[in-house]
Image (cartoon, helix red, strand yellow):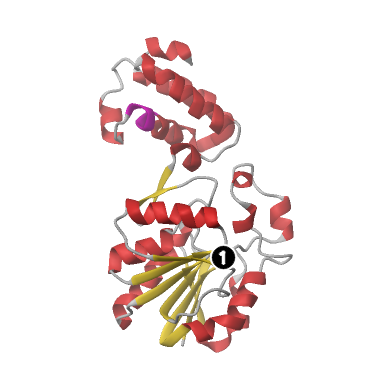
């Protein structure tokens, strides 16, 4: 797209969208606009208002590099290097899973419990980017611990805590193995893909860390371990919130018994299992 330097932004957008369509499909227009905002340093409103301006030649190489990465299958979020959850910015890269809108269902449920019950402490287990715990701390003031088995993910979570002005504690641990504390609330989005899921991953998802995706042959290994150990880390009257994959809610509820119920995401999918003690 080196010739795009001689085009208007509108023309360059059209050409980039056409190039991106094989990788992004119906999302090509939106993704193209996001790439242009990134390389230009503009917000969406300015991009829309200035489409008749000439596309700056000095931005062409950066745009070409981003498009090449996307055409190779790399997720949009990793290329941009930042993504939002709950309106908050999070640095994202291959050290951790990309924050997804589905997880806002869990965060909103956690915020509701924090406010209704006056909770003061929370654990973000399998924290990845830290988006759950950091969102809870930022939006409610609760004291949070961020825990993950991956040192690289924890380093990213530290960056995101600083980015959002949040103070938190951090622990590298295989689930609860290095955690002694008790909490009012435990929130966890564990790996939950099965062997069959891993064998049929979308190309973009293959760029995300397998450690954060694979949940055992049936995808439920982490829920079994949490069921066996969570009670000694939850204060009386506390709440455990678990994100689950599509179709897993029934099996997870069966593990935890009558104390559990299910919350649906915006698409009507059973997304969060809530266990109240």
Rendered view: 270 above or below 201: below
**Residue 80 quadrant:** top left
What residue is drawn where x is 51% and y is 55%? 153
Residue 119 rendering spot, x and y as whole percentages: 33, 79
Highlighted range, magenta? 36-40
Rendered view: 162 above or below 275: above
What residue is drawn where x is 42% and y is 63%? 132
Q: Is residue 208 visible?
A: yes
In the picture provided, is 33 more to the left or to the right than 1?
left
Q: Is residue 26 magenta?
A: no
What residue is drawn where x is 64% and y is 42%? 203
Rendered view: 277 above or below 49: below
- Label 1 SS: loop
Please name the residue that numbered disc 1 is placed on.
190
Q: Which of 269 and 96 is in front in this view?
A: 96
**Residue 237 quadrant:** bottom left
Rendered view: 127 above or below 175: above
Characterize the magenta stretch by its predominant secondary structure. helix
Q: Which of 132 and 102 is in front in this view?
A: 132
Tell me if mark 1 has few (under 14), some (14-19) or many (20+) residues whose alpha carbon lies within 10 angstroms of its own: many
Q: Is residue 104 visible?
A: no
Residue 126 rendering spot, x and y as whole percentages: 53, 64
């Amino acid at each position: 797209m080196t010739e795009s330097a001689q085009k208007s932004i509108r023309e360059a957008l059209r050409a980039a969208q056409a190039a991106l369509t094989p990788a992004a499909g119906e999302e090509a227009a939106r993704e193209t606009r996001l790439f242009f905002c990134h390389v230009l340093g503009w917000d969406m409103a300015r991009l829309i208002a200035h489409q008749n301006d000439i596309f700056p030649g000095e931005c062409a190489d950066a745009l070409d590099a981003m498009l090449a990465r996307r055409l190779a299958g790399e997720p949009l979020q990793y290329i941009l290097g930042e993504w939002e959850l709950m309106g908050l910015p999070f640095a994202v890269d291959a050290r951790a899973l990309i924050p997804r809108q589905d997880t806002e269902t869990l965060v909103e449920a956690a915020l509701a419990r924090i406010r209704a019950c006056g909770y003061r402490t929370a654990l973000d287990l399998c924290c990845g980017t830290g988006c759950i715990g950091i969102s809870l701390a930022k939006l409610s003031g609760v004291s949070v611990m961020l825990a993950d088995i991956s040192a690289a993910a924890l380093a990213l979570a530290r960056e995101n805590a600083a980015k959002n002005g949040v103070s938190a504690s951090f622990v590298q641990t295989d689930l609860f193995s290095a955690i002694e504390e008790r909490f009012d609330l435990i929130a966890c989005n564990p790996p939950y893909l099965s062997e069959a899921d891993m064998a049929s991953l979308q190309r973009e998802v293959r760029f995300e860390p397998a450690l954060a995706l694979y949940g055992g042959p049936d995808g439920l290994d982490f829920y079994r371990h949490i069921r066996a150990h969570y009670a000694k880390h939850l204060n009386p009257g506390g709440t455990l919130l678990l994100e689950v994959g599509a179709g897993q809610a029934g099996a997870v509820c069966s593990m935890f018994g009558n104390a559990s119920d299910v919350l649906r995401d915006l698409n009507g999918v059973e997304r969060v299992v809530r266990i109240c003690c």
